Amino acid sequence: MTTRDKVLSMIGLASRAGKVVSGEFSTEKAVKSSKAHLVIVAEDASDNTRKMFRNMCTYYGVPYQEYGTKDELGHWTGKEMRASICILDEGFARSVLKKISLNMEV
């Protein structure tokens, strides 16, 4: 199993545990209500979407990552294509961030 698969399966696990919201509206709401511990935006999301979430996460102090494709994020959360997801659990967020940073070192 590649590190990329490990990251995506961790997102899937968090999703099944009910600790993930997806879609722009839900992600934005979670960030603004201080429930977000990590925002992940698809690498193939529009420039506007990536910029909006990057700025919002900077302002609210929420970790932000660009990772995976819209298809992958949708698949692993059990939904249609998703440009953005938000992890609501600190433990899952830490674990996903750790796996992403390991993936970037490879």
Image (cartoon, helix red, strand yellow):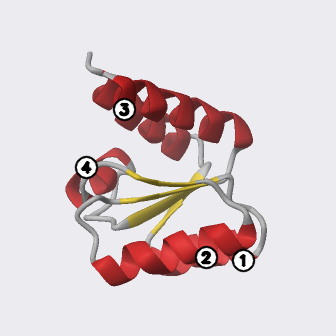
Mark 4 Cα shell of 10 Å, populated few (<14), some (14-19), many (≥20): some
Residue sitting at x 47%, y 32%: 101
Q: CA distance from mark 1 to mark 3?
A: 28 Å
Whichever of labels 2 and 1 marks the residue nearer the N terminus, that label is 1
User: Dot 3 corresponds to which residue?
Assistant: 104
- What is the CA distance from the residue labelled 2 to the residue labelled 1? 8 Å
**Element class at badge 3:** helix
Disc 4 element: helix
The mark lying in front, picked from 4 and 3, is 3
Residue at left 34%, top 45%? Answer: 76
Q: Earlier in the sequence, mark 4 or mark 3?
A: 4
Q: From the image, state whether disc 2 or disc 1 is nearer to you.
A: 2
The furthest residue to the top = 1
Q: Quarter of the image holding residue 7?
A: top left
Q: Amino acid at mark 1?
A: Lys
Label 3 and label 2: CA atoms lie apart by 24 Å
Camera-near label (4 vs 2) is: 2
What number is the disc on residue 72?
A: 4
Kind of residue indicated by mark 3: Met
User: Mark 1 sits on what residue?
Assistant: 32
Height in image: 54 above or below 2?
below
The answer to whether marks 4 and 2 mark residues whose Cβ atoms lie closer than 8 Å is no
State if disc 3 and disc 1 touch (CB < 8 Å).
no
Reply above or below: 37 against 94: below
Which residue is painted at 68% across and 52% down in the image? 37
Query: In percent of the image, x 37 and y 25: which residue is there?
Result: 105
Up-down: is 59 above or below 10? below
Name the residue tied to disc 2: 56
Residue toward you, 100 or 105: 105
Number of numbered markers: 4
